Image (cartoon, rainbow, N blue to C red):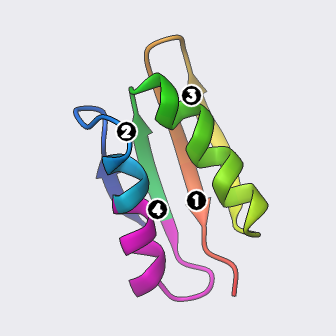
Amino acid sequence: MEQLDASHLRCPQPLLEVKLWLKSARCGQQLFLVLADPGSQRDIPAYLTRIGHGVKVVTQTSHRLELIITKHS
């Protein structure tokens, strides 16, 4: 599983990084993603769900969100 620590990045950079990963990933591949930016914490899971990818919350606090993203189709 690949990992992306985007906790030091601010919106919209984490979303751009996730989009780049989605472009190169194969179906079924997973990404462990760490976010700290409040806007990214809200927007990225919603975006991924809306376009049909799997999103599992591993850890969520007010300052940090850890997700496992699974690319579908």
Earlier in the chain: of badge 3 and badge 1, it is 3
Earlier in the chain: of badge 2 and badge 4, it is 2
Query: Which residue is identified by label 2?
Result: 11
**Amino acid type shown at disc 1:** Ile
The CA span between labels 4 and 1 is 5 Å
Tell me whether circle 2 and circle 1 mark residues in contact (CB < 8 Å).
Answer: no
Query: Which residue is identified by label 4?
Result: 31
In percent of width and height, residue 39 lies at 50, 30
**Amino acid type shown at disc 4:** Leu
Q: Residue at position x 52%, y 68% from top?
A: 30
Quadrant for the N terminus in the image: bottom left
In percent of width and height, residue 5 lies at 29, 44
Which stretch appears magenta? 17-30
Earlier in the chain: of badge 3 and badge 2, it is 2
32 or 24, nearer to the observer: 24
**Amino acid type shown at disc 2:** Cys
Residue 52 sits in quarter: bottom right
Earlier in the chain: of badge 2 and badge 1, it is 2
Residue 19 sits above or below residue 43 on the image: below
**Amino acid type shown at disc 3:** Thr
Query: Which residue is identified by label 3?
Result: 59
Earlier in the chain: of badge 4 and badge 1, it is 4
In percent of width and height, residue 61 lies at 54, 14
Q: On the rendered structure, is 23 left or right of 30?
A: left
Tell me whether circle 3 and circle 1 mark residues in contact (CB < 8 Å).
Answer: no
